């Protein structure tokens, strides 16, 4: 907004003039003295801009509104809640129109310094972007929402656990106090390939211990696919023991209440035992990787993981190389 002093042909006084909504606006300084008029201009500019800025809500307020009215009702509510918690810690009282690309870059730098991955940071910023877009649709913003910064994705291999790393993680959860829920969650994620939301939303009525089957298809509505999966005898035994001690309808519980999220506790324990870059979602990627390495077809891996398109599962195709070597060897031997 550009303000300037002007004079009119029919008045000795100075006026402040600016353009707004396609037209000119003026206000009298009530003085013909240039020095006094410039003082008036400086005070007017400051007051006007402060008043205009106050029309913009804070980022924290929009994020909370977005969660309360929309994100909290989704199956991924706990993930949105965690992202918003981190976003509010940095952005809190910043006005939405003050969320510049430069400041977003500083947010990304701070998160990277804390060891968070580019994927995690982009996911957090995508929540802020979704909140801004929804706020604009519902006319919560007086102007256009800022564009959202994005970090380039790394080409490094997708993190998955080796067999030794998985054994180390499970052994830690068996020994550590107050981690039975994390142990059960980890085994379900590793050996059924289910998403975190599906596991945390799983109730005992969808676990058939006699047949050794888990039905992940029910529960909170989600656009992401879920499957009916068979489970191993070892997992059946662990679930049987957990069911006897259960105090709620949910398979993953803590003190008789359903567990809404495990990200913070899970990553804290992983860091403590030297497993870097590991999140609950890593366990699902590990399932897909191990399945491909064992020679399972991508079609079956896709069904097990609830992928609606096999193309989504093609990320694991690179791990089929070892099993293909056996096929090539058999062809050469004529077997």
Image (tube, helix red, strand yellow):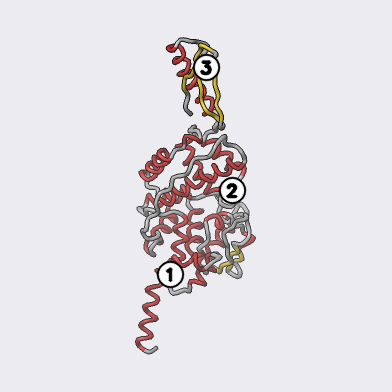
Label 2 Cα neighbours within 10 Å, binned few <14 / some 14-19 / many ≥20: few
Q: Which residue is mark 2?
A: 257
Quadrant location, the C terminus: bottom left
Q: Secondary structure at mark 3?
A: strand
Residue 318, image quadrant: bottom left
Considering every residue shown, the one lying at the far front of the view is: 9
Camera-near label (2 vs 3) is 3
The mark nearer the N terminus, 3 or 1, is 3
Which is nearer the eye, 274 or 218? 218
Which is nearer the eye, 274 or 32? 32
Which residue is rendered at x = 47% and y = 62% of the image?
190
Q: Which mark, by number, is residue 317? A: 1
- CB contact under 8 Å: marks 3 and 1: no
Camera-near label (1 vs 2) is 1
Work out how far the residue at label 3 is from the one at label 1, CA to CA, in angstroms. Answer: 76 Å
The mark nearer the N terminus, 2 or 3, is 3
Q: Which x, y percent locates residue 50?
A: 50, 25
Q: Which x, y percent locates residue 53?
A: 52, 29
Q: Which mark, by number, is residue 8? A: 3
Q: Is the residue 243 above or below the residue 140 in the image?
A: below
The mark nearer the N terminus, 1 or 2, is 2
Considering every residue shown, the one lying at the far bottom of the view is: 334
Q: Which x, y percent locates residue 299?
A: 51, 72
């Amino acid at each position: 907004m550009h303000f300037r002093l002007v004079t009119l042909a029919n008045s000795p006084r100075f006026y402040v003039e600016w353009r707004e909504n396609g037209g000119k606006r003026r206000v009298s300084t009530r003085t013909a003295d240039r020095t006094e008029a410039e003082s008036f201009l400086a005070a007017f500019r400051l007051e006007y801009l402060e008043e205009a800025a106050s029309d913009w809500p804070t980022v924290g307020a929009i994020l909370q509104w977005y969660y309360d009215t929309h994100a909290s009702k989704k199956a991924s509510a706990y993930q949105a809640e965690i992202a918003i918690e981190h976003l509010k810690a940095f952005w809190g009282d910043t006005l939405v129109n003050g969320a510049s690309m430069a400041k977003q870059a500083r947010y990304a730098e701070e998160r990277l310094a804390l060891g968070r991955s580019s994927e995690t940071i982009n996911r957090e910023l995508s929540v802020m972007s979704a909140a801004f877009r929804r706020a604009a649709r519902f006319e919560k913003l007086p102007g256009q929402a800022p564009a959202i910064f994005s970090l380039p994705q790394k080409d490094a291999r997708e993190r998955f656990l080796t067999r030794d790393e998985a054994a180390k993680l499970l052994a830690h959860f068996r020994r550590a106090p107050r981690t039975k829920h994390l142990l059960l969650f980890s085994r379900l994620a590793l050996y059924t390939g289910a998403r975190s939301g599906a596991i945390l939303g799983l109730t005992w009525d969808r676990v058939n211990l006699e047949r050794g089957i888990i039905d992940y298809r029910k529960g909170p509505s989600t656009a992401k696919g879920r499957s009916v999966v068979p489970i191993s005898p070892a997992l059946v035994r662990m679930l049987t023991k957990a069911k006897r001690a259960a105090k709620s309808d949910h398979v993953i519980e803590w003190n008789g209440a359903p567990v809404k999220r495990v990200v913070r506790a899970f990553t804290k324990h992983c860091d403590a035992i030297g497993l870097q870059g590991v999140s609950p979602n890593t366990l699902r990627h590990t399932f897909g990787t191990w399945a491909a390495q064992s020679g399972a077809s991508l079609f079956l891996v896709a069904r097990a993981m609830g992928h609606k398109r096999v193309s989504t599962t093609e990320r694991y195709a690179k791990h089929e190389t070892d099993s293909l070597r056996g096929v090539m060897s058999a062809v050469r031997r004529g077997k």
